[in-house]
Amino acid sequence: MELETPSGNLFGYTGARAHQSGQDAVVFVHGTGMDHTVWVLPSRYFAHHGYNVLALDLPAHGRSQGKPAATIDAMADAVIEAMAAANISRAALVGHSMGSLVALNAAARYPDYARSLVLIGSTAPMGVHPDMLRYAADNDHGVVDMLTYWGYSKAAQLGGSETPGLWMAGNTLRLLERAADDLIHIDLAACKEYDTGLSHAEAVACPTLFILGERDIMTPVRSAEKLISAVTKARVCVLEGSGHSLMMERPDALLDALISIV
Amino acid sequence: MSKIKTFGFDTLSLHAGQRPDPTTGARATPIYQTASYVFKSPDHAASLFNAERAGHVYSRITNPTTAVLEERISALEGGVGAIATASGQAACHLAIATLLGAGDHIVSSRSLYGGTHNLLEYTLPRFGISTTFVDPRDADAFAAAITPKTRLLFGETLGNPGLEVLNIPTISELAHAHGLPLMIDSTFTTPYLCQPFTLGADIIFHSATKFLSGHGVIIGGLVVDSGSFDWAASGKFPTLTEPYAGFHNMNFVEEFGPAAFITRARKEGIRDFGACMSPTTAFQVLQGMETLPLRMQRHVTNTRAIVEFLATHEAVEWVSYPERPDHPDHELAKKLLPKGCGAVFSFGIKGGREAGQRFISRVELLSHLANVGDAKSLVIHPASTTHHRMDAKALAAAGISEGLIRLSVGLEDPQDLVEDLDRALRASQKD
């Protein structure tokens, strides 16, 4: 659905089903340089199981227009604006990687909008490798390579997709290659500079689920411990064998975890 | 080239798409010889049917063994996904039928495998899809043939039978300037010798019957999606950008992004046309692909030895192989095919049709049959077999001389092949 917001005209994927009045909502927020297509399976599932789904393309990502949001605060504002434009007053906020910081930020600063919170592949503060930032600043393909291959467990770099016939790394490479110039750098810089994650975590009042990848080298399970401790009502689900790209590597287990809280 | 260390081609040839079987620990890819799969619950079934969960429903559409092969070829080609089909012809048809409909048009190289030529020239027009054939060396001819109804440009990495090297970077640039994808038949080169996606192609298909499986024991095909073509920006592909009533108004570009084409091909084409690959065939192709790099290296070195031998043989009029300086595409081949120009080539025998027949009747190690890409060396004389109804004039129009012999060089000791060829060539010159 097209959404007119102060951040620009944004796009939100509804899971191939129009919103119905009176249904609970689920809002998905993607990671660096990505878009709503990373949520296609859970979006379709929840949309066909009685929820209004909004898998948002953040400003300047995917099909959304507008200027890129340069901070996690601004991205969270855009999410809330999009929810308002979609007549969603309260939702399960689900974010992956950078999107998890956005969801965390939104749940802390706009608590009335958050029915529950799901942080996938998350940690705070979220360090960014200097080479990654350097390549991103130069719009060098190296940043796409790093985000892709570091984003998968070693095993998943050899495939074994649960979606038959899909080469996971290839799909991620192509998706990131579609990002406009400078967008990945803006996203990565926003992650690096977001230094209020722990205080925001302390402010989160809704039930919260962390879904982490056992073999994630970008946001390792161990690195999330402080963030988890800061959230009052936190539950943790570690998906065995998965790297950072949990939606691609373990879509079925991820969906089951989401169902347990959404 | 990736800026960080990733798995190399040889490793991917062995491992891509497969992990040890989680149930049994089997290291080799198991053959999941089953038609269908038990659902965990009614909701699980509904979720699988409605693309809400990943998994298998019915082996015409997906199968765990076949899926390994699909991932492996995607990894080796650098694509986003693939579909294994019953034959190379089925792969070609699946790709075309996913994108085109009645009224649409293709611009194709005229140097094609005969089966592909039949499909484009005679069969698809019955369904409203027309093709203009052009000289594969003439980019201007490709451009001139494009009309508002054109939806696809097509060629082979190495044309048949002249081994014209398609200038994929130039033709893909032309295609993209017109908002069109370029599809490549990469059967003769395999991803070991050429990766057309890195040169700008958008869709690849293979006859897996040939070098990929490599042992002449199966019939199969593969279609691979680069994930690079911008279907939405093109505006010419409603099958991908508009809701599809045949799958609950699924919009493939909106929902699957880079994997839009291959997802539509699976949700519609392989489901409805049904030309799927069997899991046993997929297993055999996978076995072949494990040694693809090694075999292709040997195919090429053997071919070079045979080409060198034939080029100076007194019974041979000419040898056509792009690595030879006298081949029209020699310079382009050095650029696009640095590892070699494959193992299929033609030469002309002195004495025309009769000499060709005598040669064929005297080869003993090489097998006289209609196939290429076997581990064993193969030979055919088109004027006395596939094109035997044509006179000299008609053959010339098809780019085939009466004395043309096509070889598919296998993995035997090259000296044994040389001796067999030499004996047959000498015999061919005796009345």
Image (cartoon, coloured by chain):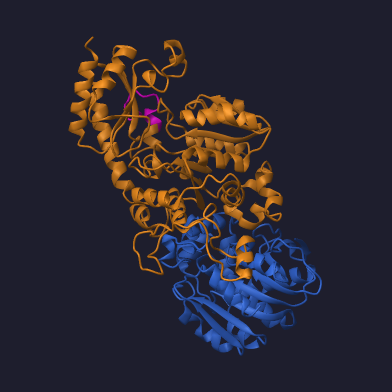
Chain colours: A blue, B orange
Is A66 part of what is drawn in magenta?
Answer: no
Give how far across and how far down residue B153 sits, in percent. Answer: 56, 34
User: Closer to the camera, B42 or B340?
Assistant: B42
| Residue at (73, 63) in percent of width and height | A17
Magenta stretch prevailing secondary structure: loop
| Residue at (21, 11) in percent of width and height | B430
- B430 in relation to A203, above or below: above
Is B327 part of what is drawn in magenta?
Answer: yes
Residue at the extreme top:
B431
Q: Say which quarter of the image contains residue A70.
A: bottom right
Give how far across and how far down residue B232 sits, in percent. Answer: 66, 48
Q: Say which quarter of the image contains residue A54.
A: bottom right
Give how far across and how far down residue A94 sits, in percent. Answer: 63, 74
Q: Is residue A214 left or right of residue A33?
A: left
What residue range appears in magenta?
Answer: B320-332
| Residue at (60, 68) in percent of width and height | B44
User: Closer to the camera, B62 or A88?
Assistant: B62
Give how far across and how far down residue B272 sits, in percent. Answer: 61, 47
| Residue at (40, 44) in percent of width and height | B191
Please state, as top left, top right, bottom left or bottom right, where the N terminus of chain A lies in the image. Answer: bottom right
